[in-house]
Image: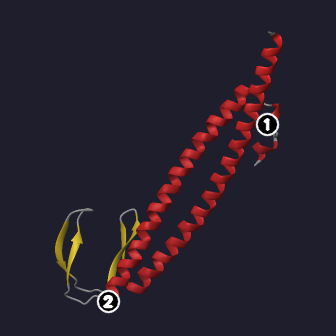
Amino acid sequence: MSENKDQKAIPIDKLSPKQLIEIRKSLEEEIQVLNQSLSQFKVAISKYEESKLIIRSLEAAKNNQEVLVPITSSLYVPGTLKNKDQVLIDYGTGYYVERNLVQASQFCNRKLEMIRDSQDKLTSLISSKANFLDKINLELQKKVAMMQQEQAKKQ
C-alpha cells in the first residue's frame, strides 16, 4: 500500500503515443491471460455440473448394478456398483474423501458457488480492462491524427 502513495495517476491525454502503445500491449496481454482463466472457470463449472448429474443418477441406481467405468474420455471398462450411496470426492492435490450422495452434492454446490463468484469478479475485471483499452485506443487514434495533421501542415 505504501508504494502506491508515491505513484501518481497520469491522465492518458498526457501520455506519448509510444507510452500509449506500451500500455495497449500490456492491457491486451493481461486481457488474454484473464480470458484464459475465464475459460478454465467454465471448464471447472462444467465438471461440477456433470458431477451433480452423476450424483442424481446414482440416487436412482441400485447396488450391484452393471456400469461402465471411464478410464479415459473414450475408454471404458465394465464394473459393478458396490455401494451406490458412497462416492469419493477429489478435494485436490491427490486428496480423496469418501462422502454420501447428499454431502457430495453439497460439495459440488459449494464449489460451483465459489467458482461462479470468482468468474463474475473476473468477468467484471476483464470488462473494466477492455473499457480502459478502448480509451487508450481512442487516445492513440487522436494523437496519430494530430501528428498526421501536423505533418500535412509542414508540407
Three-letter amino acid code at the position of disc 2: Ala
Q: Quadrant of residue 149?
A: top right
Pointer 1: what residue?
Answer: 12
Residue 139 vs 44, above or below: the answer is above
Q: Name the secondary structure under disc 1.
A: helix
Q: Is residue 98 visible?
A: no
128 left or right, relative to 75: right
The 10 Å Cα crowd at callout 1, few under 14, some 14 to 19, many 20 or more, is some
Task: Report x, y in % for residue 100.
Answer: 37, 85
Please determine whether, in this image, residue 112 is positioned above or below residue 65: above
Q: On the rendered structure, is 17 left or right of 46?
A: right
In this figure, what is the number of numbered marks? Answer: 2
At horizontal 47% and vertical 57% (from top left) the residue drawn is: 40
Identify the residue under disc 2.
60
The residue lying toward the viewer, choosing from 18 and 118, is 18
x, y percentage for residue 115? 53, 66
Q: Is residue 82 left or right of residue 124?
A: left
Give the residue at x 71% y 45%: 132
Numbered disc 2: secondary structure? helix
Instruction: Give the x, y percent position of residue 2.
Output: 78, 46
| Residue 141 against residue 53 in the figure, above or below | above
